[in-house]
Image (tube, rainbow, N blue to C red):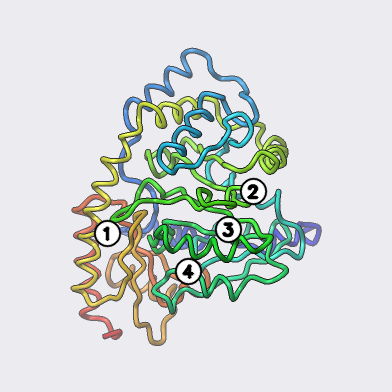
Amino acid sequence: MQHLLNKHVQAIEISGIRKFFNMVADEKDVISLTIGQPDFHTPEHIKQAAIQALMSNQTTYTHNAGILPLRKAISQFYETNYEVSYSPEKEIIVTTGASQAIDVAFRTILSPGDEVLLPAPIYPGYEPLIRLAGAKPIYMDTTKTNLKLTKETLEKHITPKTKCVVLPYPSNPTGISFSKEELASFVTVLQAKQVFVLADEIYSQLIYDQTHTSIASFPRMKERTIVINGVSKSHSMTGFRIGYTLAPDWLSREMLKVHQYNVSCASSISQYAALEALTSGVDDTKKMQVAYHERRNFVYDRLQKIGLHCPKPNGAFYMFPYFPLKEMTSFTFGLDLVQKGRLALVPGDSFSKLGEGYMRLSYAYDKRTLNLGLDRLEEYMQQSPLN
């Protein structure tokens, strides 16, 4: 019966991040710096809001697009922080996490034969959804420009088949973001093309040394941009599964059809928790951001002392150092590091073939764990044939 299955489904694979994590999960005395899961607990007042919603019987279906107070809070959040306005009634959809938001967006805009541009190395969650929609991912190599997309690279890759450009910033796995000036250079290219932009801004509240600018805030960009965001990373609410899309009215109407038939609506209890996060919890992120900023500086300095090249990230909680591998792939190196160094990092080829030679290190861990992990990495590198 296997030949009857959807060929697109058969062609995709489980995320390399999870595949590697599962392989080493049972190893003893291994420090894992692999998963992008905030190590902070969900703030207490947000948990209480969820409990209150449960106890007051807010346990029914909601509007397909989400409860209106939450959509109003999202609208206010974007207007206050990023100076771009969205109608709560017509241009915002609350989704079951940012992953479902991305899926809804792609299934709405993509048709077989379309191409989607991805700056790589890049989070592995985009490609399978693109392929499931019958479209083709096209990777733009950023390894020669310090892991940052440039106007020239973007311009070179756009063709008549290009339907969408994905801009995840700050990026997973690199932590790299874009300045307002860099985004402006992309805008000069994109405004002249009939292409959508999917701006994944899930880490926008975790940014250092600069401020986040939404590309939708530029003239004539809101009409072609689908913004993806959520509360998973900003408020340590990964298990609540609340994301959202922001897009013009005419596009949101079409996406809402896909969303409706996919999940009907996001969890009602989680929506009330997210409402608390985006109203009374606006300062919660600042405490986490300060801690991540300190950890970034600590990890970056240690990697430099170890002798590993790594662009200094200005957002999220990831480092993407390069290892001068000889005979090994990133994956086999990762296994060797676990077996000999008792340290787990995510192999760079999990983030496309352009990630080969890199390893992703998550610093969403406490300082003691990070220090022990980096000690083990330093000891491994001292004894490694890589040097």
Q: Which residue is under mark 4?
A: 149
**Type of the residue with mark 4:** Leu
Separation of disc 4 and disc 2 at Cα? 22 Å
Q: Nearer the viewer, mark 4 or mark 1?
A: 4
**Badge number at residue 366:** none
**Type of the residue with mark 2:** Ala
Mark 3 vs 1, N-terminal side: 1
Q: Nearer the viewer, mark 2 or mark 3?
A: 2
Point out residue 287 in the picture as x, y percentages from the top left corner: 26, 40
Residue at 68 percent across and 43 percent down: it is 251
Point out residue 188 in the picture as x, y percentages from the top left corner: 55, 64
Q: Nearer the viewer, mark 4 or mark 2?
A: 4
Q: Quadrant of the N terminus?
A: bottom right
Q: Residues within 10 Å of mark 4 (few under 14, many from 20)?
A: many
Q: Which residue is under mark 3?
A: 126
Q: Which residue is under mark 2?
A: 105
Separation of disc 3 and disc 1 at Cα? 33 Å
Residue at 30 percent across and 65 percent down: it is 343
Q: Nearer the viewer, mark 2 or mark 1?
A: 2
Q: Which residue is under mark 1?
A: 29
Mark 4 vs 1, N-terminal side: 1
Q: Quadrant of residue 302?
A: bottom left
| Pointers 4 and 2 in contact (C-beta within 8 Å) | no
Judging from the image, what secondary structure is the residue with disc 2 in? helix
Point out residue 49 in the picture as x, y percentages from the top left corner: 41, 22
Point out residue 210 in the picture as x, y percentages from the top left corner: 32, 55
Q: Residues within 10 Å of mark 1 (few under 14, many from 20)?
A: few
Mark 4 vs 3, N-terminal side: 3
